[in-house]
Amino acid sequence: MSVLHYVRRSLPTRALMVSLGTVLLATFALGGVASAHGSVVAPASRNYGCFQRWGDDHQAPEMRTKDPMCYQAWRTNPAAMWNWNGLYRENLAGNFRGGIPDGTLCSGGHAENGRYDALDKVGRWVTTPVSNNFRVRLFDQASHGADFIRVYVTRQGFDALKQPLRWSDLELVGQIGNTPASKWDQAGRGVSIDVPASAPGRTGQHIVYTVWQASHQDQAYFLCSDVNFSGGSGKSASVQPETDEGHSASVLDRIVQTVSAWLPST
Protein backbone atom coordinates (compact mmCIF):
# COMPACT_ATOMS: atom_id res chain seq x y z
CA MET A 1 0.00 0.00 0.00
CA SER A 2 1.43 3.38 -0.99
CA VAL A 3 1.90 6.10 1.60
CA LEU A 4 -0.54 8.34 -0.25
CA HIS A 5 -3.15 5.56 -0.35
CA TYR A 6 -2.72 4.95 3.38
CA VAL A 7 -3.05 8.65 4.14
CA ARG A 8 -6.16 8.90 1.96
CA ARG A 9 -7.79 6.06 3.91
CA SER A 10 -6.66 7.26 7.32
CA LEU A 11 -7.35 10.98 7.25
CA PRO A 12 -10.51 12.99 6.71
CA THR A 13 -10.56 14.94 3.47
CA ARG A 14 -9.76 18.33 4.99
CA ALA A 15 -6.97 16.92 7.14
CA LEU A 16 -5.54 15.20 4.08
CA MET A 17 -5.59 18.46 2.15
CA VAL A 18 -3.81 20.31 4.94
CA SER A 19 -1.24 17.54 5.39
CA LEU A 20 -0.40 17.35 1.71
CA GLY A 21 -0.36 21.13 1.41
CA THR A 22 2.03 21.40 4.34
CA VAL A 23 4.38 18.81 2.86
CA LEU A 24 4.34 20.47 -0.55
CA LEU A 25 4.86 23.94 0.89
CA ALA A 26 7.81 22.70 2.92
CA THR A 27 9.26 21.13 -0.21
CA PHE A 28 9.01 24.37 -2.16
CA ALA A 29 10.28 26.45 0.74
CA LEU A 30 13.37 24.30 1.23
CA GLY A 31 14.08 23.73 -2.43
CA GLY A 32 12.99 26.99 -3.99
CA VAL A 33 11.80 30.08 -2.17
CA ALA A 34 14.47 29.99 0.51
CA SER A 35 17.28 29.71 -2.03
CA ALA A 36 15.83 31.84 -4.83
CA HIS A 37 17.22 35.21 -5.71
CA GLY A 38 16.02 37.07 -8.80
CA SER A 39 15.15 37.31 -12.46
CA VAL A 40 14.56 39.68 -15.36
CA VAL A 41 11.20 41.31 -14.72
CA ALA A 42 11.08 43.58 -17.79
CA PRO A 43 10.88 42.39 -20.45
CA ALA A 44 9.72 39.49 -18.32
CA SER A 45 11.66 36.24 -18.40
CA ARG A 46 9.65 33.28 -19.62
CA ASN A 47 8.83 31.77 -16.25
CA TYR A 48 8.34 35.13 -14.50
CA GLY A 49 5.93 36.16 -17.26
CA CYS A 50 3.99 32.91 -16.86
CA PHE A 51 3.88 33.46 -13.10
CA GLN A 52 2.64 37.04 -13.51
CA ARG A 53 -0.05 36.20 -16.04
CA TRP A 54 -1.35 32.92 -14.63
CA GLY A 55 -0.09 32.50 -11.09
CA ASP A 56 -3.47 33.39 -9.63
CA ASP A 57 -5.23 30.81 -11.80
CA HIS A 58 -2.70 28.40 -13.27
CA GLN A 59 -5.41 25.81 -13.99
CA ALA A 60 -7.46 28.18 -16.15
CA PRO A 61 -8.57 26.25 -19.27
CA GLU A 62 -8.26 29.33 -21.48
CA MET A 63 -4.48 29.34 -20.95
CA ARG A 64 -4.25 26.47 -23.42
CA THR A 65 -5.29 28.69 -26.33
CA LYS A 66 -4.35 32.16 -25.06
CA ASP A 67 -0.87 31.28 -23.83
CA PRO A 68 0.07 27.78 -25.06
CA MET A 69 3.74 27.94 -24.11
CA CYS A 70 2.92 28.90 -20.53
CA TYR A 71 0.28 26.17 -20.58
CA GLN A 72 2.86 23.51 -21.36
CA ALA A 73 5.30 24.98 -18.85
CA TRP A 74 2.78 24.92 -15.99
CA ARG A 75 1.85 21.35 -16.78
CA THR A 76 5.42 20.19 -17.15
CA ASN A 77 6.58 21.58 -13.80
CA PRO A 78 4.66 24.29 -11.88
CA ALA A 79 7.71 24.78 -9.64
CA ALA A 80 9.45 26.50 -12.55
CA MET A 81 6.98 29.37 -12.16
CA TRP A 82 6.59 29.35 -8.38
CA ASN A 83 10.39 29.45 -8.24
CA TRP A 84 10.71 32.07 -10.98
CA ASN A 85 13.68 33.58 -9.12
CA GLY A 86 15.80 30.43 -8.85
CA LEU A 87 17.02 29.72 -12.38
CA TYR A 88 20.77 29.65 -11.85
CA ARG A 89 23.83 27.45 -12.06
CA GLU A 90 26.76 27.33 -9.67
CA ASN A 91 30.50 26.78 -10.12
CA LEU A 92 30.65 27.14 -13.90
CA ALA A 93 33.75 29.35 -13.53
CA GLY A 94 32.68 31.40 -16.53
CA ASN A 95 32.54 28.38 -18.85
CA PHE A 96 28.98 29.09 -19.88
CA ARG A 97 29.13 27.59 -23.34
CA GLY A 98 30.71 24.43 -22.00
CA GLY A 99 28.22 24.11 -19.15
CA ILE A 100 25.08 25.01 -21.09
CA PRO A 101 24.71 23.15 -24.41
CA ASP A 102 22.89 24.62 -27.40
CA GLY A 103 19.16 24.10 -27.13
CA THR A 104 19.17 24.34 -23.33
CA LEU A 105 20.00 28.01 -22.84
CA CYS A 106 16.60 29.03 -21.47
CA SER A 107 16.71 26.32 -18.80
CA GLY A 108 20.27 27.18 -17.80
CA GLY A 109 21.45 23.82 -19.11
CA HIS A 110 18.81 21.77 -17.25
CA ALA A 111 19.21 23.76 -14.01
CA GLU A 112 17.80 22.26 -10.82
CA ASN A 113 17.67 18.74 -12.28
CA GLY A 114 15.54 19.84 -15.21
CA ARG A 115 13.00 21.92 -13.30
CA TYR A 116 13.08 24.63 -15.99
CA ASP A 117 13.33 22.44 -19.09
CA ALA A 118 9.92 23.53 -20.41
CA LEU A 119 11.39 27.01 -20.93
CA ASP A 120 13.56 25.59 -23.73
CA LYS A 121 10.50 24.60 -25.77
CA VAL A 122 10.21 26.38 -29.11
CA GLY A 123 6.88 28.02 -29.85
CA ARG A 124 4.68 31.06 -29.65
CA TRP A 125 5.76 32.56 -26.34
CA VAL A 126 4.01 35.78 -25.34
CA THR A 127 6.19 38.74 -26.33
CA THR A 128 6.85 42.21 -24.94
CA PRO A 129 7.01 45.07 -27.50
CA VAL A 130 10.30 46.97 -27.39
CA SER A 131 12.17 49.48 -29.51
CA ASN A 132 15.66 48.86 -30.83
CA ASN A 133 17.01 50.82 -27.87
CA PHE A 134 15.54 49.34 -24.72
CA ARG A 135 16.37 48.45 -21.13
CA VAL A 136 16.45 45.16 -19.30
CA ARG A 137 15.35 45.37 -15.67
CA LEU A 138 16.77 42.76 -13.33
CA PHE A 139 15.35 42.20 -9.84
CA ASP A 140 17.75 40.94 -7.15
CA GLN A 141 15.73 39.63 -4.24
CA ALA A 142 18.75 38.80 -2.09
CA SER A 143 20.77 41.96 -2.87
CA HIS A 144 23.78 40.03 -4.15
CA GLY A 145 24.80 42.61 -6.73
CA ALA A 146 26.62 41.61 -9.89
CA ASP A 147 30.11 40.86 -11.10
CA PHE A 148 28.58 41.55 -14.50
CA ILE A 149 25.31 41.47 -16.41
CA ARG A 150 25.38 40.74 -20.14
CA VAL A 151 22.40 41.18 -22.45
CA TYR A 152 22.22 39.37 -25.77
CA VAL A 153 19.63 39.41 -28.55
CA THR A 154 19.14 36.86 -31.30
CA ARG A 155 20.53 37.83 -34.69
CA GLN A 156 18.19 39.15 -37.36
CA GLY A 157 16.90 36.16 -39.33
CA PHE A 158 16.59 33.90 -36.29
CA ASP A 159 13.16 32.24 -36.24
CA ALA A 160 12.04 32.12 -32.61
CA LEU A 161 8.96 30.09 -33.60
CA LYS A 162 10.95 27.24 -35.14
CA GLN A 163 14.56 27.27 -33.96
CA PRO A 164 16.00 26.18 -30.61
CA LEU A 165 18.30 28.80 -29.14
CA ARG A 166 22.04 28.36 -29.69
CA TRP A 167 24.97 30.42 -28.49
CA SER A 168 25.86 31.24 -32.09
CA ASP A 169 22.42 32.87 -32.52
CA LEU A 170 23.21 35.55 -29.92
CA GLU A 171 24.82 38.96 -30.25
CA LEU A 172 25.90 41.05 -27.27
CA VAL A 173 23.82 44.26 -27.15
CA GLY A 174 24.43 45.59 -23.63
CA GLN A 175 26.42 44.96 -20.47
CA ILE A 176 27.51 46.40 -17.16
CA GLY A 177 30.46 45.41 -15.01
CA ASN A 178 30.89 44.92 -11.28
CA THR A 179 28.01 46.68 -9.53
CA PRO A 180 27.39 46.14 -5.80
CA ALA A 181 23.80 45.97 -4.61
CA SER A 182 24.26 49.33 -2.86
CA LYS A 183 24.27 50.95 -6.31
CA TRP A 184 21.05 49.27 -7.42
CA ASP A 185 17.60 50.82 -6.87
CA GLN A 186 15.43 49.74 -3.97
CA ALA A 187 12.54 47.57 -5.17
CA GLY A 188 10.23 46.02 -2.61
CA ARG A 189 12.30 43.66 -0.46
CA GLY A 190 15.15 43.61 -2.94
CA VAL A 191 16.93 45.81 -5.45
CA SER A 192 16.69 46.28 -9.20
CA ILE A 193 18.88 47.64 -11.95
CA ASP A 194 18.29 48.63 -15.57
CA VAL A 195 20.80 47.60 -18.23
CA PRO A 196 20.67 49.69 -21.44
CA ALA A 197 20.69 47.67 -24.65
CA SER A 198 20.87 48.59 -28.32
CA ALA A 199 19.86 46.11 -31.03
CA PRO A 200 19.75 47.99 -34.34
CA GLY A 201 18.25 46.33 -37.38
CA ARG A 202 16.02 43.95 -35.44
CA THR A 203 12.40 43.50 -36.46
CA GLY A 204 9.80 40.98 -35.39
CA GLN A 205 10.05 38.35 -32.66
CA HIS A 206 13.37 37.76 -30.92
CA ILE A 207 14.80 36.36 -27.70
CA VAL A 208 16.63 38.55 -25.21
CA TYR A 209 19.11 36.45 -23.26
CA THR A 210 20.45 37.84 -20.00
CA VAL A 211 23.41 36.40 -18.12
CA TRP A 212 23.77 37.69 -14.57
CA GLN A 213 26.86 36.68 -12.64
CA ALA A 214 26.05 37.31 -8.98
CA SER A 215 28.78 38.67 -6.71
CA HIS A 216 28.32 36.65 -3.52
CA GLN A 217 29.63 33.39 -5.03
CA ASP A 218 30.10 31.66 -8.38
CA GLN A 219 26.40 31.72 -9.21
CA ALA A 220 25.14 32.69 -12.66
CA TYR A 221 21.58 33.22 -13.89
CA PHE A 222 20.47 32.53 -17.47
CA LEU A 223 17.22 34.19 -18.44
CA CYS A 224 15.22 34.19 -21.69
CA SER A 225 12.76 37.00 -22.44
CA ASP A 226 10.62 37.09 -25.57
CA VAL A 227 10.25 40.43 -27.33
CA ASN A 228 8.85 41.91 -30.51
CA PHE A 229 10.78 44.74 -32.11
CA SER A 230 7.72 46.58 -33.34
CA GLY A 231 8.04 49.96 -31.71
CA GLY A 232 7.01 50.77 -28.17
CA SER A 233 8.67 53.17 -25.77
CA GLY A 234 11.73 51.04 -25.14
CA LYS A 235 11.49 51.90 -21.45
CA SER A 236 11.35 49.33 -18.69
CA ALA A 237 7.84 48.60 -17.54
CA SER A 238 6.91 49.49 -13.99
CA VAL A 239 7.12 46.09 -12.32
CA GLN A 240 6.89 45.36 -8.61
CA PRO A 241 8.04 41.79 -7.95
CA GLU A 242 6.41 39.91 -5.10
CA THR A 243 8.16 39.97 -1.74
CA ASP A 244 9.22 36.81 0.06
CA GLU A 245 6.09 36.95 2.21
CA GLY A 246 3.75 37.57 -0.70
CA HIS A 247 5.42 34.89 -2.78
CA SER A 248 5.20 32.27 -0.03
CA ALA A 249 1.56 33.10 0.65
CA SER A 250 0.66 32.84 -3.03
CA VAL A 251 2.45 29.50 -3.27
CA LEU A 252 0.45 28.18 -0.29
CA ASP A 253 -2.82 29.36 -1.82
CA ARG A 254 -2.03 27.64 -5.09
CA ILE A 255 -0.89 24.43 -3.41
CA VAL A 256 -4.17 24.27 -1.49
CA GLN A 257 -6.08 24.86 -4.74
CA THR A 258 -4.11 22.13 -6.49
CA VAL A 259 -4.49 19.62 -3.66
CA SER A 260 -8.21 20.40 -3.45
CA ALA A 261 -8.54 19.48 -7.11
CA TRP A 262 -7.03 16.05 -6.41
CA LEU A 263 -9.53 15.18 -3.70
CA PRO A 264 -13.04 13.80 -4.14
CA SER A 265 -15.89 16.12 -3.28
CA THR A 266 -17.62 15.55 0.05
Image (cartoon, helix red, strand yellow):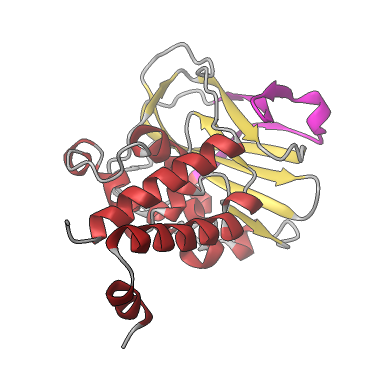
Residue stretch in magenta = 170-198
- Which quadrant of the figure contains the N terminus? bottom left
- Which quadrant of the figure contains the C terminus? bottom left
The image position of residue 32, as x and y in percent, is: 57, 54
Res 204 → quadrant: top left
Taking the spot 17% from the left edge, 38% from the top edge, the residue there is: 62
The image position of residue 150, as x and y in percent, is: 65, 38
Farthest residue in the bottom direction?
1
215 lies left or right of 246: right
Farthest residue in the top direction?
233
91 lies left or right of 124: right
Which one is nearer the viewer's eye here, 105 or 72?
A: 72
Which one is nearer the viewer's eye here, 17 or 104?
A: 17
Work out whether 219 lies above or below 6.
above
The image position of residue 115, as x and y in percent, is: 47, 61
210 lies left or right of 64: right
In the rendered structure, does residue 102 fall within the stretch colored magenta? Answer: no
Res 215 → quadrant: top right
Which one is nearer the viewer's eye here, 131 or 1?
A: 1
Work out whether 173 lies above or below 132.
below
Main secondary structure of the magenta stretch: strand
Taking the spot 45% from the left edge, 47% from the top edge, the residue there is: 252
Tell me how many marks there are. 0
The image position of residue 216, as x and y in percent, is: 81, 48
Taking the spot 42% from the left edge, 57% from the top edge, the residue there is: 21
Answer whether residue 10 is visible to the viewer in this image: yes
Answer whether residue 115 is visible to the viewer in this image: no
Work out whether 216 lies above or below 10.
above
In the rendered structure, does residue 178 fall within the stretch colored magenta? Answer: yes
